[in-house]
Amino acid sequence: MNSNHQMFFIPWNIGMHWTLVVVAPKKIIHLNPLKGRPIPEEIEQMIGRAFMYIGDAHQYLGPWQGIAQANCPRQPKSQECGFYVLKYMTDIVARANPNRYIIEDQKAFGGKKQYDPKTEILPLQRKWIEQLMAVIHGDD
C-alpha cells in the first residue's frame, strides 16, 4: 500500500452470498447487497488480524477502527448478489474520486437505492455470459 489513492477490492462469498470489502485510504468498508446484514464477526476479526501484520497498513489506514458499512444499492431479489458486487466495483473505479464516492453516508453511490435490472444489471450479466462462453469455446 503505497498511495492515498490506491484501493483494494476483496469480493467475499459468505455462505452462497457475495459481498465486497474495500480497503480504501483511511477506511475499510463493507458493501453488502442485502439490507441489514453486517459483515460477519469472524471476517471482521480476520481482516483485523491481517491488518496488524501489514507494515504499511497503519500509515495507510491509521489505527484499526473496524469495518464501516457502506450505504450502497441493495438487491431486490436473492440471486443478484454477485452481479451487484461486480457493479459496485465497476461504479467505484469509474469515478474521479472513488474513495469519496463510497464513503459519503447518504450520497454514497449517488444515493441510489438499487440498480435498474434492465439497464444496469442485465448488460453486466450478458457480458459475463459472453466471456464465459468464450472461455468454454477456447476463444481468446
Image (tube, helix red, strand yellow):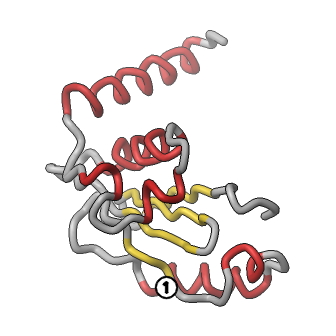
Residue 4 in the image: x percent, y percent? 71, 62
Q: Quadrant of the N terminus?
A: bottom right
**Residue positioned most to the left:** 76
- Residue at the (33%, 68%) spot, across then down: 105
Is residue 72 found left or right of 35 in the rendered image? right
The local crowd at label 1, few if under 14, some if 14 to 19, many if 20 or more residues have their Cα within 10 Å, is few
Residue 16 in the image: x percent, y percent? 36, 59
Is 78 drawn above or below residue 133 in the view shown?
below
Q: Secondary structure at mark 1?
A: helix
The image quarter in which residue 104 lies: bottom left
Residue 48 in the image: x percent, y percent? 61, 85
Report the number of discs. 1
- Residue at the (44%, 86%) spot, across then down: 41
Q: Quadrant of the C terminus?
A: top right
Is residue 37 found left or right of 69 in the rendered image? left
- Residue at the (22%, 73%) spot, across then down: 36
Amino acid, disc 1? Glu
- Residue at the (56%, 12%) spot, across then down: 137
Residue 13 in the image: x percent, y percent? 45, 60
Q: Which residue is mark 1?
A: 42
